[in-house]
């Protein structure tokens, strides 16, 4: 799966972005569980999901800041 960039998130509606963030958090939780039990096969996926989540949260924060102004 290709990594999403900030420009991909900026084009999303707010509700869709929030749903995507929720999904990324769930995936990150599951990956951490797999890592803890030694079942994680793709260590790189953990890094990718963290970066994607950070990018999505940043874009969401930018939208919230723009709404306040």
Image: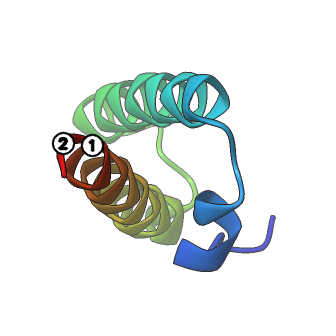
| Rendered residue at 48%/68% (across/down) | 48
Q: Nearer the viewer, residue 4 or 30?
A: 4
Q: Nearer the viewer, residue 51 or 57?
A: 57
Q: Residue furthest right?
A: 1
Left or right of residue 48: residue 2: right
Number of other residues with Cα within 10 Å of mark 2, as a class: few under 14, some 14 to 19, many 20 or more: few
Left or right of residue 49: residue 11: right
| Rendered residue at 29%/36% (across/down) | 32
Number of other residues with Cα within 10 Å of mark 1, as a class: few under 14, some 14 to 19, many 20 or more: few
| Rendered residue at 49%/37% (across/down) | 24
> Secondary structure under badge 1?
helix
Quarter of the picture holding the N terminus: bottom right
Relative image position of residue 36 (x, y in whole percent): 23, 34
Residue marked by disc 1: 64
> Secondary structure under badge 2?
helix
Residue marked by disc 2: 68
Circles 1 and 2, Cβ within 8 Å, touching? The answer is yes
Q: Quadrant of residue 50?
A: bottom left
Q: Quadrant of residue 62?
A: bottom left
């Amino acid at each position: 799966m290709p990594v999403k960039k900030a420009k991909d998130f900026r084009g999303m509606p707010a509700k869709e972005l929030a749903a995507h963030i929720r999904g990324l958090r769930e995936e990150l939780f599951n990956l951490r569980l797999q890592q803890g039990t030694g079942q994680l096969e793709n260590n790189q996926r953990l890094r990718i999901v963290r970066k994607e989540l950070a990018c999505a949260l940043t874009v969401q924060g930018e939208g919230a800041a723009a709404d306040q102004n």
